[in-house]
Image (tube, rainbow, N blue to C red):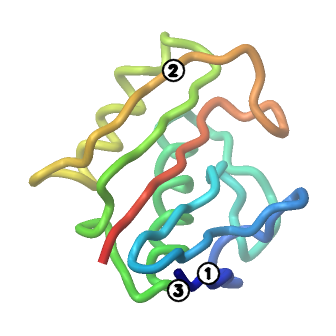
Amino acid sequence: MTKKIISTSDAPAAIGPYSQAILAGDTLYCSGQIAINPSTGELVLDSIQTETEQVMKNIKAVLKAAEMDLSNVVKCTIFMSSMEHYGDINTVYAAYFSENPPAREAVAVKTLPKEVNVEISVVAVR
């Protein structure tokens, strides 16, 4: 098995000792993305909808760096600061996966990095 680190300036740089994504064979393991605008380095926290939109843009950028897109995603994990955000996150998420959506879980957690409200990680396969 080959292991390749995937990195792009079109998504936020890792804020810890991890890679944006790892390509292992034909499977891409993407680290969780939060709503950091990669151009400014600032968090996008205007609303849970805009926050989720930025997360999805960041995921798309990492997938693109691995020569993949959302159609390659087989599994998502959504972490949210409160289940009260579930409906709004789901509405934005559904717009990105309107056909043949991947498997996923959505869980509420006590705290997320930088006190954000949503973090999403994905697994994609060529």
- Circle count: 3
| Quarter in which the C terminus is drawn | bottom left
Q: Amino acid under label 1?
A: Lys
- Give yes or no for contact between labels 1 and 3 (Cβ–Cβ under 8 Å): no
Q: Position of residue 61 (x, y in %)?
A: 52, 76
Name which residue lies at 35% across and 21% down: 87
Q: Amino acid under label 2?
A: Val
User: Depth-wise, is mark 1 or mark 3 nearer the camera?
Assistant: 1
Q: Secondary structure at mark 1?
A: strand
Other-residue count near label 1 (Cα within 10 Å), few / some / many at <14 / 14–19 / ≥20: few
Name which residue lies at 41% across and 45% down: 76
The quarter of the picture where residue 70 lies is: bottom left
Residue where numbered disc 3 is placed: 65
Residue 123 marker: none
Other-residue count near label 2 (Cα within 10 Å), few / some / many at <14 / 14–19 / ≥20: few
- Give yes or no for contact between labels 2 and 3 (Cβ–Cβ under 8 Å): no
Does residue 21 appear to the left or right of 39 in the view shown? left
Residue 107 marker: 2
Using the image, determine if residue 64 lies above or below residue 119: below
Viewer-proximal residue, 1 or 111?
1
Marks 1 and 3 sit apart, C-alpha to C-alpha, by 15 Å
Q: Earlier in the sequence, mark 2 or mark 3?
A: 3
Q: Earlier in the sequence, mark 1 or mark 3?
A: 1
Residue where numbered disc 1 is placed: 3
Q: Secondary structure at mark 2?
A: strand
Q: Amino acid under label 3?
A: Ala
Does residue 23 appear to the left or right of 70 in the view shown? right
Q: Position of residue 125 (x, y in %)?
A: 33, 69
Name which residue lies at 44% across and 26% down: 106
Marks 2 and 3 sit apart, C-alpha to C-alpha, by 27 Å
